[in-house]
């Protein structure tokens, strides 16, 4: 189980990655914005943080790479 902070310009939300159903680009936004759908709702975001490790997400590929990076750090015991 891993909790990641998803952020936008006005708020942030802590989401358990085990409860994420999908992540996609929000085409209605001018700047790169993404939407995470999870058990309990949805949230628009542009960056992510896990245990002090911050990642901006200019592309959808960056979102997935950031999640994988956080998972690897967690596996190594970093950020605890």
Image (cartoon, helix red, strand yellow):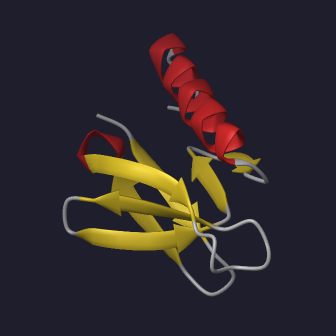
Left or right of residue 66: residue 21: left
Judging depth in this view, the residue of 14 and 19 nearest the camera is 19
Check the picture and name the quadrant holding the N terminus: top left
Left or right of residue 73: residue 31: right
Residue 32: image x %, image y %? Answer: 75, 65
Residue at 69%, 79% (x, y): give it: 29
Vertical side of 43 occupied by 9: above or below: below
Left or right of residue 42: residue 4: right
Residue 21: image x %, image y %? Answer: 29, 48
Residue at 67%, 64% (x, y): give it: 46
Left or right of residue 15: residue 8: right
Vertical side of 27 occupied by 71: above or below: above
Residue 59: image x %, image y %? Answer: 74, 49
Residue at 43%, 60% (x, y): give it: 36
Residue at 53%, 12% (x, y): give it: 76
Vertical side of 62 occupied by 21: above or below: below
How many marks are shown on the rendered structure?
0
**Looking at the image, which residue sits at the far left?**
39
Residue 77: image x %, image y %? Answer: 50, 18
- Residue 48 sits in which quadrant? bottom right
- Residue 8 sits in which quadrant? bottom right
């Amino acid at each position: 189980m891993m909790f990641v902070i998803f952020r936008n310009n006005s708020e942030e939300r802590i989401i358990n990655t085990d409860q994420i159903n999908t992540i996609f680009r929000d085409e209605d936004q001018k700047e790169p914005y993404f939407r995470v759908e999870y058990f309990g709702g949805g949230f628009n975001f542009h960056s992510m943080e896990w245990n002090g490790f911050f990642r901006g997400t200019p592309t959808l590929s960056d979102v997935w790479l950031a999640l994988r990076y956080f998972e690897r750090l967690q596996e190594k015991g970093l950020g605890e």
